[in-house]
């Protein structure tokens, strides 16, 4: 893919709005093969939560006429404000006639500086609500089962050990009123 077209494609695929002062695209020439891997790591794992969205190993279309893009995607969430670094490693998978599995040959290893800004108070509340909603959405069956079991336990305990009203003896004769 032509360099300018690739840069525009990357700019469009970035989930946040790139800031002209802090966002930049760096291009480098690397060796490629038919199958490649790309990995993203935090220099300090306490600074970022990185979750892979796309497959690690991907087929790369080598024909000049093929316009299919190979794309690796991650969700990167900063866990601490400040200047940090993320490592990106790209490897070509090369088949060796001697081995069954391809050999991973590193073709790029770079450090990406990242400036993470602290969230605003509104973003913090939104993040807490979002995390809570996602947890409930993903675990509603467990939550419903737990609430049902808890309600049953409370009902049983109440019936077993709850304060019982003394029953009136209906066998005793009631005094008769003479008029």
Image: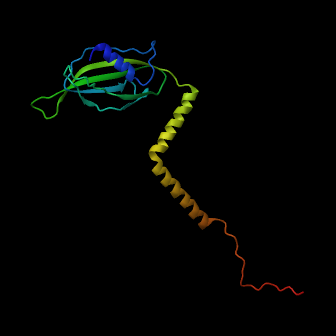
**In this rendering, would 95 be left or right of 161?**
left
Residue lying at the far front of the rendered structure: 65
State the residue in front, 54 or 148.
54
**In this rendering, would 125 be left or right of 114?**
right
Is 115 placed above or below 74 here?
Answer: above
Q: State the image coordinates of residue 88 (x, y, percent, origin top left).
A: 32, 22
Q: State the image coordinates of residue 116 (x, y, percent, origin top left).
A: 47, 21
Q: Quadrant of the C terminus?
A: bottom right
**In this rendering, would 71 be left or right of 178?**
left
Looking at the image, which residue is at 42% across and 15% down? 23
**In this rendering, would 3 be left or right of 31?**
right
Residue lying at the far left of the rendered structure: 97
Q: In which quarter of the image is the N terminus?
A: top left
Q: How is the image coloured?
A: rainbow
Is 114 placed above or below 54 here?
Answer: above
Q: In which quarter of the image is residue 96?
A: top left
Looking at the image, which residue is at 29% across and 19% down? 109
Looking at the image, which residue is at 34% across and 16% down? 7
Q: Quadrant of residue 73?
A: top left
State the residue in front, 97 or 164.
97
Q: State the image coordinates of residue 95 (x, y, percent, origin top left).
A: 14, 29
State the residue in front, 99 or 36.
36
Q: In which quarter of the image is residue 151?
A: bottom right
Looking at the image, which residue is at 46% across and 16% down? 19
Residue 94 in sight from this viewpoint: yes
């Amino acid at each position: 893919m032509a360099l300018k077209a690739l840069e525009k494609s990357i700019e469009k695929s970035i989930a946040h709005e790139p800031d002209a002062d802090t966002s930049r695209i760096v291009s480098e020439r690397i060796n490629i093969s038919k199958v490649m891997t790309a990995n993203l790591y935090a220099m300090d794992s306490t600074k970022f939560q990185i979750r892979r969205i796309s497959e690690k190993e991907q087929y790369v279309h080598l024909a000049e006429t093929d316009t299919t893009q190979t794309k690796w995607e991650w969700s990167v969430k900063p866990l601490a404000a400040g200047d940090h670094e993320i490592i990106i490693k790209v490897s070509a998978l090369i088949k060796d006639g001697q081995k069954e599995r391809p050999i991973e040959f590193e073709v790029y290893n770079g450090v990406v500086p990242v400036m993470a800004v602290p969230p605003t108070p509104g973003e913090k509340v939104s993040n807490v609500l979002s995390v809570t909603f996602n947890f409930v959405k993903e675990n509603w069956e467990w939550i419903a089962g737990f609430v049902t079991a808890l309600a049953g336990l409370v009902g049983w305990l109440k019936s077993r050990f709850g304060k019982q009203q003394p029953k009136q003896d209906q066998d005793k004769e009631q005094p008769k009123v003479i008029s």
